[in-house]
Image: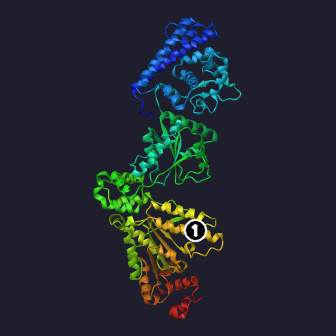
Amino acid sequence: MNLPHRTLDWRDHNAEWLRLALCHLRLRLHRYALRASPGTPTAVNWIVAGGAGEPPCPSSGKLDGEIAELARALAACEERMRAAGRLPALRMVAELTSLGQLETALLLLAAAPAIDGAFALAYAQLQGGPGHGRATLQLALAIELEDSGARLLALDVLMPARPLRALRLIDAETDTREPVLTRALSVDERMADYLRGVNRIDERVERMLASPPVAPASASTEQAGHAAAALIAAQPATWMTINLIGRIGRGAEQAARVACESLGLTPRLLDIVRLVALSPADRAEQLALLGRDALLAGLALVVDTRGIQAASEQAAVVDELIATVAATLFIVSAERWPGDRGIATVQVPGPSREEQRQLWRTALNGDAQQIESGIDAIVQQFDLGGPAIAGIVERASRAGPAISTESLWTACRQQSGIALDEFAGCLSTCYGWDDIVLPDDVRMQLRELAGQVRQRGRVYDRWGFGAQLARGRGITALFAGASGTGKTMAAEILASDLALDLYRVDLAGVVSKYIGETEKNLRRVFEAAEHSGAILFFDEADTLFGTRTEVRDSHDRYANLEVNYLLQRMEDYAGLAILATNRRSALDSAFLRRLRFVIEFPFPTADDRRRIWERVFPAAAPTERLELAFLSRLELSGGNIKSIALNAAFLAAAQQESIGMPAVMRAAAREYAKLSKPVSAAEFGPYYDTVRP
């Protein structure tokens, strides 16, 4: 990939400077050849001279004069380029990587054969034969330094930690059996191209990188990005690491992009998975190349660690990256990246509701006015950042010419699904209001609950009630009632009516016997749900939210801390959380005061049971002379009735007959046995003998 910041004019000037630099090197090689071997063949002089025209005069004094004249021409060319705002490529490498004068000269010596093949022939002649077409450190130091003591001290230039090797500016033979002085020096194709004026990213590096998605940034995100840029600009070193802390979809990557724009860098996403897959030796090589290309191409590496578990192999590789790569790094994480490396941290808050409205309007452009009210509803339900919003609008635009509130709402649900298979499962929402049998008062409370979810934007924002609420803008409800009275079904109906996903939280997986783990698991649940707009359904909530106990020991104290933490998260949660319990009495009054709705699901009356029996069999199911009045006398919940109807259908199907009273009563007897209820003649009447063992 060629980077656009090199202009043709600059390349012309750079080519002229490089031509002069190579001529200067040729003359110095020629001078060295004359001094080291006065009988050097004329052919070697011709090769050193560039292979054209007459070889230079063997007079050492005249060579010194020509070398000095070329040095002045080089300096003048460099000054003209500096005045125009661009240095020669070799000088830029030296400044970017803090090379000294000798190191810069060694780099040119190593690169010369890759730019002009005549140098390989010259090096071979000067070093003893065809197999020596690369300059050794001994030859390089002999050309550059006359004092033997200075040459001894200069051996440090090829230490592994020095820039020439650490950044792979020079390839040096690393066979430890070979003396360092006789190791051959060369450059790879990427470095040779750079010195010629072609700044491209190494193929080995490019396959590890990707461009971050371009999306508008909110004011909060821009502020975080400028804060990160200020920290980097104040650092005297060429690079540093910034830990951007923000949840997925809230704009941390955008903050990195804003910082890079301010610093004149180009952000690139680093594929940490591919880096982990490398062997330790290959990974060390890749990190060195990443650092080199980041400096030469003006890159900043962005590493998203939000899916990485602490103390994992991936986390160890991230630590290795922070410790070794010579590049500006943005480590994106949901919490502060662990470890004591002195990494600067910048919090990236999610955009406010008003900022999200503006992000939607910007992304929708001309379509925003048509669905302005829909934007308000979406913003209240889904907490999304700039990248997520831009992606949703782009997909909706590709799906069809007209963008509607419904299509955006559906896309938001798909974008914001909760990745919490460990703790929560998504429930299907196939029921409607007509499918549930409840007293009118309970049904009215459920509709009021749905209405509050829909009208949050109007009440909180337009009517100003939100400014009076430091917390508690979320809507929380308790569904209390015996098993099978319709609590789960009511939650599914609400989700279907509101067009939201419903997640049932697995409390058995959330609650941990280890101190602090329950709070950590609860935090993961709520943080994952924050931006999704999903309804959280905690079934059998009394197992976690039961009556708080007096503190008798340390375990009681931590159990109370877990409950207090839950109460705080419920107040802060912007969505709808439903808690279901079979035992309302297990919840203490302090907990109940925090709930917006407390809805009792009563055991169904005989009339309610009859209505349930009327609806429980699908229209396509073959039924025959069912005595609904008789069946409604059985004291069963709606869940039990549903189970009986299904089992009766299988009994009838096995007998190749319609669903009649005998099959239903046999299924009812099985249900009574499950509930440890006796099957009596008083309840089963004429069917008692049919179902009796």
Residue occupying the point 44% across, 85% down: 609
> Which three-letter amino acid code belongs to the residue tagged 1?
Leu
Q: Quadrant of the C terminus?
A: bottom right
* Above or below: residue 338 compared with residue 443: above
Residue 263: x percent and y percent?
Answer: 45, 39
Residues 329 and 606: in front is: 329
Q: Quadrant of residue 449?
A: bottom left
Residue 195: x percent and y percent?
Answer: 49, 26
Q: Residues within 10 Å of mark 1 (few under 14, many from 20)?
A: some
Q: Is residue 681 left or right of residue 498?
A: right
Location of mark 1 (residue): 561
Residue 287 in sight: yes
How many numbered circles are shown?
1
Residue 619 in sight: no
Residues 681 and 529: in front is: 529
Circle 1 sits in a helix, a strand or a loop, which is it? Answer: helix
Residues 464 and 588: in front is: 464
Residue 188: x percent and y percent?
Answer: 55, 28
Residue occupying the point 44% across, 75% down: 597
Residues 472 and 636: in front is: 472
* Above or below: residue 251 compared with residue 154: below
* Above or below: residue 157 compared with residue 627: above
Residue 478: x percent and y percent?
Answer: 47, 75
Residue occupying the point 42% across, 49% down: 223
